[in-house]
């Protein structure tokens, strides 16, 4: 089946550790996105990639980093510089930049 | 700046009740408008969309009409089911300087009781 996979579903880390969230898609989509969702808030864009080997900062990129070495993969690293990392992280992709976005199931990260 | 305002939840209804979730927006230009649904523990799914004024988006019994004069895109369903329990997000897509992005509302949680 085609789709977007995020793993793991739940992730726990100690404060001060970097952690990498996985996002894989087999939809052959060019564009991929990372969002952060906090309780009672809408989604906020962290980073996006319009095409492989390219990525741009979104609205809240500080404390995060990404890479896009392969078309199907767009991992997000939450660094120790991110002040409030505990959140639900959603990855999305679209066939081209600006087209309808399809979302993965999300990863809930808890940092204590 | 561009923004989306949704009615605050949570909204609790009985099965077969009528649903309205209000959404208004502020945007420069002519945005496309969307409703996304998030079922418990899952990612977002596109529910419906409208790309220009007076367009009506519809899916699974839900409808929303793009009203430019009132800058609104209210979600409605005539008879809700327990399976409609989810969080609903209104969103707009804007294009500025060759860049496009989705701007989301804060979400409205709907609970439908049998």
Image (cartoon, coloured by chain):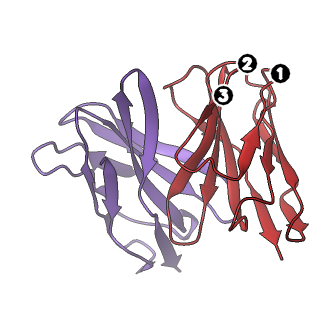
The residue beneath circle 2 is: A52
The image quadrant that residue B75 belongs to is: bottom left
- Locate residue B44, reporting x and y percent: 59, 50
Quarter holding residue B18:
bottom left
Residue at 18%, 49% (x, y): give it: B71
Q: Nearer the viewer, mark 2 or mark 3?
A: 3
Residue at x 24% of width, y 35% of height: B55
Image spot of residue B96 (x, y percent): 35, 28
Image quadrant assignment for residue B102: top left
Q: Which numbered circle lies on residue A70?
A: 1
Vertical placement of B86 versus A98: above or below?
Answer: below
Residue A55 tag number: 3
Residue drawn 75% across the image and 37% down it: A66
- Labels 2 and 1: the sequence-earlier one: 2
Is residue A7 among what the camera can see?
no
Colour in which chain A is drawn: red
Disc 3: CA contacts within 10 A as few (<14), some (14-19) or many (>=20): some
Circle 3 sits in a helix, a strand or a loop, which is it?
Answer: loop
Other-residue count near label 2 (Cα within 10 Å), few / some / many at <14 / 14–19 / ≥20: some
Q: Chain of mark 2?
A: A
Residue B55, compared with residue B15, is above or below; it is above
Instruction: Judge by depth and name the residue closer to the eye, A100 or A44.
Output: A44
Instruction: Tell me the colour chain B is drawn in.
Output: purple
Whether residue A74 is situated above or below residue A39 in the rendered picture: above
Q: Are marks 2 and 1 in contact (CB under 8 Å)?
A: yes
Q: Position of residue A44 (x, y in %)?
A: 54, 52
Residue at point 57%, 51% (across, down): A60
Observer-nearest of A31 and B114:
A31
Which type of secondary structure does the marked residue at label 2 adopt?
loop
């Amino acid at each position: 089946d085609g789709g977007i996979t995020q793993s793991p579903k739940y992730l726990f880390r100690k404060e001060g550790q970097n952690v990498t969230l996985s996002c894989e898609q087999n939809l052959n989509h060019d564009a991929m996105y990372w969002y952060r969702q906090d309780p009672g808030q809408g989604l906020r864009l962290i980073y996006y990639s319009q095409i492989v080997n390219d990525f741009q900062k979104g609205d809240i990129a500080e404390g995060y980093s990404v890479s896009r070495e392969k078309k199907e993969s767009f991992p997000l690293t939450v660094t120790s510089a991110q002040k409030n990392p505990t959140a639900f992280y959603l990855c999305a992709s679209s066939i081209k930049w600006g087209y309808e976005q399809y979302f993965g199931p999300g990863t809930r990260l808890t940092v204590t | 700046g561009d923004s989306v305002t949704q009615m605050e939840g949570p909204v609790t209804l009985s099965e077969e009740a009528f649903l309205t979730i209000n959404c208004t927006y502020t945007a420069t230009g002519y945005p496309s408008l969307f409703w996304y649904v998030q079922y418990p523990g899952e990612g977002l799914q596109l529910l419906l969309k409208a790309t220009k004024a007076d367009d009506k988006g519809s899916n699974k019994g839900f409808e929303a009409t793009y009203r430019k004069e009132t800058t609104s895109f209210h979600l409605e369903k005539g008879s809700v089911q327990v399976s409609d329990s989810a969080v609903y997000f209104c969103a707009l897509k804007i294009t500025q300087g060759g860049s496009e992005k989705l701007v989301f509302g804060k979400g409205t949680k709907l609970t439908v009781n049998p």
